[in-house]
Image: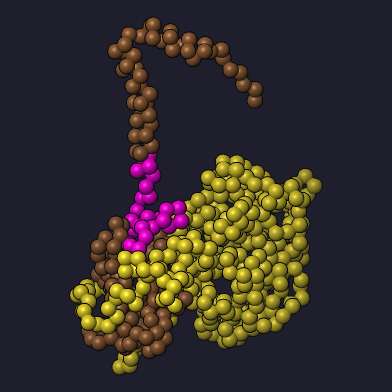
Chain colours: A brown, B yellow
Amino acid sequence: MATTTPFRWPRRVRRCVWRLVVPGGLAFALGLLPLLLVGLVVGLMAIRTVAAQPTPAPSGSVDPPSGSVDPPSGSVGVAQTLLCPGTIVLQLRNDGAYPVTIAQVSVNDAFWPFTAGPSTTIAPHGTASVTLRYSWDAGVAYEVRFISSTGAMYVTDIDASTTASAPPCP
Amino acid sequence: MHDDHTSHHGWITHPRSRRHALSVGLGTLVGLVGARSLPARRAPQQATPQNVEPASGGPMPMPMPDVVGDVDHRRNGFNPSQILTDFDAGEVGTLPNGQTVHTYRFFAVAKTVEIAPGVMYPAWTYNGRIPGPTIRVRQGDRVRLAFTNATDHHHGVHFHGIHPSSMDASIVQVPPGGRFTYEFDAEPFGVHLYHCHASPLAEHLARGLYGAFIVDPKQGWQRADHEFVMVTSGFDVNFDRQNEFYNVNAIPFHYIKHPIAVKVGALVRIFLVNILEYDPINSFHLHANFFHYYPTGTSRTPAEYTDTIAQMQGQRGLLEFRFRYPGRYLFHAHKTEFAELGWTGHFQVVGL
């Protein structure tokens, strides 16, 4: 599409005319206008960014979404592992700023039924115990994956050298 | 293996960890044995499945691989149990030349889908469901598909079949807010598929933009008592280009929780389409039975009588079989990793 450029006086001429027309104090105030406009635009963008934050999933999860936004790094770790006869208990700790909901758990590439207490949702600085009825074998390494409600994945290894835990066992 | 790990605030970055995987190690900071007791726990929040209830007087049996909980199909807006038999002929009309025309309206829609219990995934869908509608027409009929792209990315509908290149989505990419009508004659008969062909291709497929396209022969198939469509795929929920979940018709283990009912002696026909991304080969294995396999469904003579077949991405075929005995029969990918990460189901066979 063709465009036309309207005639404009040279910048130096325009500046002179401007100084003739506008008194000093008013000129100073008007000079601040661009700054105020920039501030307004930045403020609006900030409000828009806040408004665009993900709304919690209906399940009550408030994890940040994976994919578009990285989940906070290193937010969930295993504080303790118990290997009991036919059972594995992992105590998870949330060191992040967001609650994390553990939706599914897999052991060595197989999803595995589990229970979690007191809740599958771990508050910031909170803990949860995940219990798996699993026929583990001494001398075998296991990889346990925790998948959160937003698809973030936390991985831990149970080392092959791990031995059975002393009580308490569930 | 731990030699390769990088310690950071006590946690260990696992060498197998994926792009968004947040790895934790046990070896360094964790007390592995019960030197410290766990805090008192309240009652578990989620119930274990029925198969872990203790047998009377005996030890508790070990659970089978499964996901915990149920998907809210109503919130998702689709249910794999219904998708199984949901064949869509579109709006059927007749062209001036007497040819039958099937008109469809497809919308590409970005939608958060619960792709496993409690796991919310930012999917891209055709008409809000995964897989998209199962298009089913007769050989030689006209297909007219009005496509609207209601997302922020380019999309399209690429059909497997025979048609002019001007109707191919690899040529026609529809911009956000754009529309395009694909129109062609359905050829050849068989089991086909459609999917988005925008780039990056892997992501556009993996996010959910695919579906089955069935072209019945002019003279029809042999009459079957049950016809099911099964689209096998996976979900990469942390966007590391590896799948965490595998499935038939989108939801892992769905047909374990909701077995497919068939009758003893009845002819079962399955339209099987593999659209799995990131893994090169998928498979189908039927327990305690054999089936006739028609690759791509383009021949009326079976190529094989077997209980296991392999399909690469985009490969599809037609299976026919009858159950001789009542009972519950597994079917699953014979790649056991896929099976135990969701690609497993049951037929529940009942007597006549």
Q: Residue furthest right?
A: B97
Q: Quadrant of the N terminus of chain B?
A: bottom left
Q: Quadrant of residue B192?
A: bottom right
Residue B92 x/y as whole percent: 67, 51
**Up/down of B253 relative to A48, above or below:** below
Q: Quadrant of the C terminus of chain B?
A: bottom right
Q: Residue at x 59, y 54 (%)?
A: B200
The part of the chain drawn in magenta is: A48-77
Can residue B9 be seen at all in this image of the molecule?
yes
Majority secondary structure of the magenta segment? loop
Foreground residue among B216 and A55: A55
Q: Residue at x 47, y 13 (%)?
A: A12
Foreground residue among A16 and A57: A16
Foreground residue among A42 and A10: A10
Residue B258 x/y as whole percent: 47, 72
**Up/down of B233 relative to A80, above or below:** above
